[in-house]
Amino acid sequence: MGFSGRYLRQYRAAAWGFVLFVMIFLGAFFLYQLPLGAVLYPALLCGLLGGLFLLVDYGRCLQRHRRLTELAKLPGALMEGFPETRRVEEEDYRQIVEELKGAQRELENRMEQRYGDMVDYYTLWAHQIKTPIASMRLKLQKEDSPLSRRVREDLFRIEQYVEMVLAFLRLDSDTTDYVIREYEVDGIVRQAVRRYAGAFIGRRIGLCYEPAAASVVTDEKWLLFVLEQLLDNALKYTPENGTVTIGWEEPGTLWIRDTGIGIAPEDLPRIFERGYTGYNGRADKRASGIGLYLCRRVCQNLGHGLTAESAPEQGTTVRLVLARQKDVS
């Protein structure tokens, strides 16, 4: 029901009351054989004045309705400038709204404080955990055995998980550490490949890479994080003696293709959702469903595109469209 219908409905009882009173006067005048015009003429004048009153009141109510509709589109914290109240119940409702706004502000402040404390704690934890990891890596450098190589690989994976924690905490932070400028794509790719060199060798997976003679406007650290996550996924789901290929195509697209187990068609549209692991992730109990979600979020912040193509047992191709599409906020 529109505004006009609801407005008329609220005066329905008054209209029926007016008609009832007129009928009572008509009945009384009829019984006493008095001129009925003495009732009809005042009733007509009252009806005209009542209609005029309704028109004026309708205009005022319509303005207030439009103002309240505009306020309803705003967040609770920004709802200011309510129309002046004209009735007791309207003032009561306004006071209730103000109390709810105050309670909401208080709740938001508490939640922000708790979130800030949580971010501070986990940030501190992530930095502290790096110290024993670095110490263990230094001790393992003196050994070269199958066991030490496996332990070093596990340490590297722990480091990646720590970086994921830090990236997750920084995504929604009010302050960002983006350093946006022009970088050579080849330099960033080589850093990512160098970090995973041991994993390529240990798992006997081949790497095909032709240096990309191109540059892109981005943030080096965050783009490196995305590439490392994509390489980690490629290595995780590519069997021994498989191949990971990194290539460049215009306009400004870096792609990573593997010869792994691929992704089921029903899982492909959801692989960038937070916490979604799909069939492969459920088979691999270590999957968290966070890596690709972080990649998508980082790419959105940097103005890059991220897509994936895959088929079961035919490998996966992930494309990074590195042409910036928007300014980083």
Image (spheres, rainbow, N blue to C red):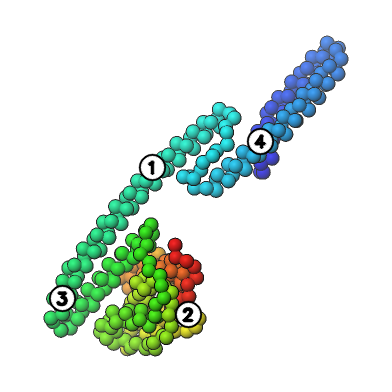
SS for callout 4: helix
Residue drawn at 27 percent across, 67 percent down = 162
| Figure quadrant of the C terminus | bottom left
Residue topped by disc 2:
252
Q: Nearer the viewer, residue 329 or 149?
A: 329
Residue 104, percent from left and from top: 42, 43
Residue drawn at 30 percent across, 68 percent down = 163
Q: N-terminal of the two: label 2 or label 4?
A: 4
Residue topped by disc 4:
60
Residue 49, percent from left and from top: 76, 26
Q: Could you give the CA–CA distance between mark 2 and mark 3, rounded to whole angstroms?
A: 39 Å
Residue drawn at 46 percent across, 69 percent down = 303
Q: N-terminal of the two: label 4 or label 3?
A: 4
Number of other residues with Cα within 10 Å of mark 4, as a class: few under 14, some 14 to 19, many 20 or more? few
Residue 233, percent from left and from top: 35, 76
Number of other residues with Cα within 10 Å of mark 2, as a class: few under 14, some 14 to 19, many 20 or more? some
Q: Nearer the viewer, residue 9 or 105?
A: 105
Q: Could you give the CA–CA distance between mark 4 and mark 3, rounded to whole angstroms?
A: 78 Å
For badge 4, the amino acid type reads Arg
Q: Which mark is residue 106?
A: 1
